[in-house]
Amino acid sequence: MQAGAAQGRDNLFGSVLMMVSMAGFTLNDTCIKLLSGSLGLAQVVFLRGLLVSVLLYIVGRRLAAFSHRLSRRDLRIIAVRTLAELGATYFFLTALFHMPLPNVTAILQALPLSVALAAALVFKESLGWRRLSAIAVGFAGVMLIVQPGGEGFSVYALYALAAVGCVTMRDLAARRLSPEVPSVAVAFITATSITFVAGLILAFEMGEAGAGGKPLSEISWPETRLILGAALSVLAGYLASVMCMRVGEIGVVAPFRYTGLLWALVLGWAVFDYWPDGMELTGATIVVAMGLFTLYRESRLRRGAA
């Protein structure tokens, strides 16, 4: 009885942490989108990455995350994961710069569906007709959000879909990492790599500016606060997402990742005065429902195997 009560408390705490994680990521997206009108993509990614790398280094040192010696196999997997993260960062932020926040977030809710499908194709994991049907219906919901060929279609919706593909590759690579590899160390390597690449692009843009190209934007105090807010929000989101998976049961905690869409709807309305139309909301509802069903089926199969 006591064990059941303790597990219930852990699941509740894990669910709260997942909601905090989604709030952190969505606040980061909001700050980045607010910067899109004044700063370039490379400049934003570099400045945010610099702050996140420093903060992750401090956290990693406190947790002794850098003392673990990585094998060659894990280093290769981290390299693949980092390349996927680079692609995801570029495609997602480009879409975010040009599309409403709720729409981009809604498209990313297809991630559990794409991961389940990719795991079946790449790792030959079992995928029954129920989950396969849910994936098909879920991607039909994505098409309602994207609206290809419609008046509301934006080519940047394809960037959001490309981001889903890159994040899927990233998550599949993470599944192959050895269990003893510290998550903070992986995040630090990824963050510093993205910051380095963004710095190279920024240096090239500065060279172009010196040769008569478009100069880099000066950063005002409000923009500095937004960059700091983005860095702190994404760090809080990452740490909470790691903690929640170590506290509660995955089958209970994972569905709360869809609260990110609720945060995006609220912030999209409050900050950008935008509310999706009926077709977009219908598509988002379908994607979330099919994602929840997929997570439910995976949880039942996991319990049955246990």
Image (cartoon, rainbow, N blue to C red):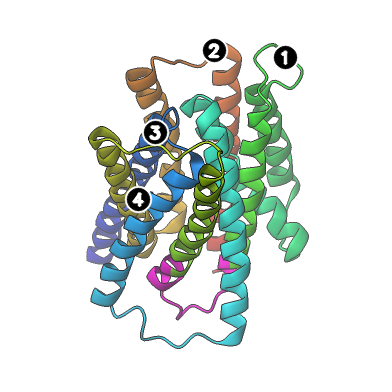
As drawn, 193 above or below 265: below
Identify residue type, mark 4.
Gly
Q: Nearer the viewer, mark 4 or mark 3?
A: 3
Q: Which residues are magenta?
A: 174-188
What is the quadrant of the C terminus in the image?
bottom right
| Discs 2/3, front | 3
Q: Residue at x 56, y 71 (%)?
A: 78
Q: Secondary structure at mark 2?
A: loop
Distance from Cα at disc 4 to Cα at disc 1: 35 Å
In the foreground, 181 or 253: 181
Q: Residue at x 77, y 58 (%)?
A: 121
Q: Secondary structure at mark 1?
A: loop
Q: On the image, numbered disc 2 is attached to which residue?
A: 277
Q: Which residue is mark 1?
A: 150
Q: Which residue is mark 4?
A: 237
Which residue is nearer to you in this view: 229 or 6? 229
**Tags 2 and 1 in contact by the CB under 8 Å rule?**
no
Q: Which mark is residue 30?
A: none
